[in-house]
Image: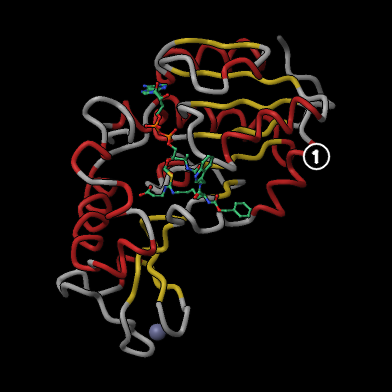
Amino acid sequence: MKIKETDRLLVLTGAGISAESGIRTFRASDGLWEEHRVEDVASPQGFARDPHLVWRFYKERYKQAMSVEPNPAHYALKTLEDALGERFWLVTQNVDGLHGRAGNKNVIEMHGSLNTALCTHCHKRFPTAEIDLEAELPPCPNCRKMLRPDIVWFGEIPYQLDEIQSLLDKATLLLVIGTSGNVYPAAGFVMAARYLGARTMCVNLDAPQNKSFFDDFHQGKAGEVLPGLVAEWLK
Ligand code: BV8
Ligand code: ZN
């Protein structure tokens, strides 16, 4: 396949693209959800029930995200954005911030980010690097009430769905990388793109739940498969 001058590429990524950077995925055998029940650490109810547990879980993931580097799969997406400019957009389910650190600019973090905290009271956002992480329950620098991780939990509405819908409407190519296709509405993007006439491609270690909706499925590790695919598409 070649990427044509008229093509508009939308990329969706999940935890699998960060696996080779050393960040655990969710649903693998050694996955994040193995030690924590999703409901306890990634839901508003869990945060209300035990904010200490939830802050411990996210502080740990923030520290880990700061200690790892983007991998060749992240850099391959930077190469694509350099080549396509405004015809490239990247929506990620990941909260680790690695796409930004790899240099991508056209990025939507639909499930939030470990790099910001949100005040439960005045709803202001603050860089996690600037809040008091030593405090069990970090206080809001503005109103002193309790901050929460700026993460979209289960049962909460993902960020920028309107922008994502308009990107899906215009996309001629959808590339989905490193996601098991378990979580909606992200897992439904491939159905929408296909319905709207886009060519749908997947790069994943295992067959995702929504495999049947992809025109092309490249099985393997994103860090190993993606750079070669990108070189071929841009030739
Ligand atoms: C919403 C932040 C309403 C937390 C996350 C019943 C049926 C259908 C849906 C529902 C249902 N009950 C409830 C729902 C809705 C629910 C949902 O989908 N639940 C699922 C589990 C059934 N969804 C929600 O609640 C969402 N909100 O629906 O609001 C609404 C919506 C729209 C409009 C109006 C109202 C909110 C979901 C967001 C939850 N927050 N993350 C945190 O990160 O701490 S979700 C969490 O899962 C992460 O964001 C993660 O990104 C996401 C998906 O997981 P994956 O990224 O796919 O990771 P996973 O481990 O599963 O897979 C990794 C894949 O990578 C594997 O396939 C593996 O093979 C592959 N891989 C591994 N290594 C590599 C690799 N691939 C390539 N290379 C490698 N090296
Ligand atoms: Zn506040």
Give above or below for 45 relative to 185: below
Q: Is mark 1 within 8 Å of ligand 1?
A: no
Left or right placement of residue 35 versus residue 104 in this view: left
Q: Secondary structure at mark 1?
A: helix
Quadrant hosting residue 231: top right
Q: Nearer the viewer, residue 14 or 73?
A: 14
User: Residue 10, percent across and down?
Assistant: 67, 34
User: Residue 83, percent across and down?
Assistant: 66, 29
Left or right placement of residue 116 versus residue 62 in this view: right
Q: Residue at x 46, y 27 (%)?
A: 180
- From the image, which quarter does the N terminus lie in? top right
- From the image, which quarter does the C terminus lie in? top right
Quadrant hosting residue 31: top left
Q: Residue at x 57, y 17 (%)?
A: 211
User: Residue 171, percent across and down?
Assistant: 76, 33
Give above or below for 19 relative to 69: above
Q: Residue at x 41, y 71 (%)?
A: 118
Q: Residue at x 30, y 26 (%)?
A: 28
Residue type indicated by callout 1: Asp
Seen from this angle, which residue lies furthest bottom? 143
Question: Count the marks: how many?
Answer: 1
Left or right placement of residue 120 versus residue 208 in this view: left
The residue where tag 1 is placed is 169
User: How many neighbours does mark 1 have within 10 angstroms: few (below 14), some (14-19), or many (20 or more)?
Assistant: some
User: Residue 95, percent across and down?
Assistant: 41, 48
